[in-house]
Amino acid sequence: MDTLTLNQLTKLLQADRFNFLPKSSVAFRKLSASMILMASDLLLVIVSIALSLLTQYLIAPGSAPYQQYLPIFILTLPMFPIAYSLHMLYPGFGVDVIEELRSLSYGTTIAFVALWMVSFFVPDFKAYSRLPFVVAWIFALIAVPIGRAYVRKVFSSKTWWGIPVIVIGAGRAGERVIYSLLKQKHIGLRPIVAVDDDIDRWGYIHGVPVIGGLEVIPELSQKLCDEYAIIAMPKVSGPRQQEIINKYSKYFAHTTVIPDMFGLSSLWVSTRDLGGILGLELQQRLLSKVSLFKKRVFDIALGSILLFLSLPFMAVISVLIFVDSKGKIFFKQERMGINDSRFKMVKFRTMHYDAEKRLAAILKSNVELKKEYEIYHKLKDDPRLTRVGKFLRKYSLDELPQFWNVIKGDMSLIGPRAYIPWEKIKMSGHDETILKVKPGISGLWQVTDRNKSSFEERNLMDIYYIRNWSMFLDIYIVARTIAVVLTGRSGY
């Protein structure tokens, strides 16, 4: 591999290929992103307020005129960016989407509570309804996160979005960190260089230069980046890693250390101070009785609404299936439920009546398709699918009848994949965790890599979901599921 000196690296990063702004521009990056996000937040809060006043007018035309509410709303608008700032949402680089959703919900609620309290001090306002405040709050809870997601999607592709990051360590852990940050640009952490003592690793990782040794870090910090560093050397001995942290973390405002549990990096951990000793607590969030109760209430409430709204669509789909091909309209299949129980999962039939015979024939005659099926347990061009079935699979409409499974209590709206009993032997022991909760109609892997992920990767994402569960994660997955279904992305 070609190696780079520090001076060559500096010139390279300043070249058009990288469009990298100098270290002095970090403040500009933060300010620009903060102003854009603040404008989006305020705009959508104003839209939410306008929609609430319109709702008030449509429901009760004779109620207080909107002019009566406007001064209070205008007076309290600054409360929203203040509340979001207190939750560290400007610019929010490095904040994951679930934490952002949680902080936005808390910040929005705090701001509206403050707004509601202020209204009691306005003369002649006590007689008017506070319903517009509640409606505006509901609209804002939905609109503000959507606005931020759109802003990040639009601007994360810009070279000035985000802050530069130096990755210390170019081994397996460093490579995965770089790949993850490059893939998820919306996070706003941009790896610009990796540093490693091992000369064999010098060169490039996914286009990011790798130089060494570690003694160049102080000069790198001075010339390029003193904002953020990630120490990704989990396999280095404890004393050496402690030496690296003590020696080089002082050059950066923020330093993240990848611990020596990198293989379990997807686990939810929280820090615990044990009398001056740092502890990492691993949680199984969805396995508590309180979490399961909250999730069941969520399933019944939203599942009932979705079942009712989907009835007209299911009637049309039933007619199309009946006309298109021979066989029953519904397809029932035994799946593994909570605590390794069995239940019949209901779907619209998408395959021909002799589906299994067709599958056996094609797997016998085509080695590549057999390999694909063994990895994904699906085929992209599945010969078993009917014409209507292909459309239903693409947009996941075949799963609409599963709302009934949710109401019955066999499934959840969001959860791990509903595995077939014969797949248990291939779950490599992961079934011990996954089968402790109800399977879901949708889940984390369906809204991320969907059908691009292997069977093993789906298992790991299901375990991640169980350990990281929160109502905000479920809400996020519901929103992403709607987007995936509407676009038909990677569906088959």
Image: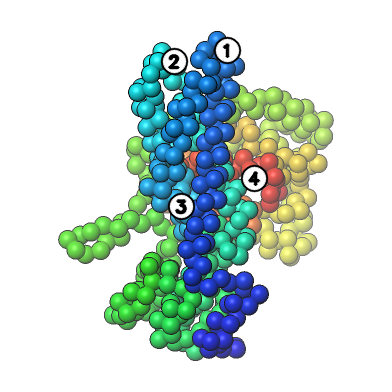
Q: Do the residues labelled 3 and 2 touch (CB within 8 Å)?
A: no
Which of 243/491 is in front?
A: 243
Q: What element carries label 1?
A: loop
In this view, 110 is above or below 256: above
Q: Indicate which disc, 1 or 4, sits on the residue closer to the N terminus.
A: 1
| Residue indicated by mark 1 | 61
| Residue indicated by mark 3 | 90
Asked whether residue 426 is in view, the answer is no
Q: In this view, does 372 lie to the left or right of 99?
A: right
Q: How far apart are marks 1 and 4 (CA)?
A: 39 Å
| Residue indicated by mark 2 | 128
Specify the farthest residue to the top: 62
Q: Are marks 1 and 4 in contact (CB under 8 Å)?
A: no
Which of 386/44 is in front?
A: 44
Amino acid type, callout 3: Tyr
Crowd tier of the residue under label 1, counting other residues whose Cα lies within 10 Å: few below 14, some 14–19, many 20 or above: few
Which of 492/265 is in front?
A: 265
In this view, 288 is above or below 65: below
Residue 123, quarter of picture = top left
Q: Distance between the residues labelled 1 and 2?
A: 13 Å
Question: Residue 491: horizontal and vertical position, in percent?
Answer: 69, 48
Q: Is mark 3 on a helix, strand or loop?
A: loop
Q: How far apart are marks 1 and 3 (CA)?
A: 39 Å
Q: Which mark is residue 484?
A: 4
Please tell me whether mark 3 or mark 4 is closer to you in this view. Answer: 3
Q: Indicate which disc, 4 or 2, sits on the residue closer to the N terminus.
A: 2
Q: Distance between the residues labelled 3 and 2?
A: 35 Å
Q: In which quarter of the image is the N terminus?
A: bottom right
Residue 304, quarter of picture = top right
Amino acid type, callout 1: Pro
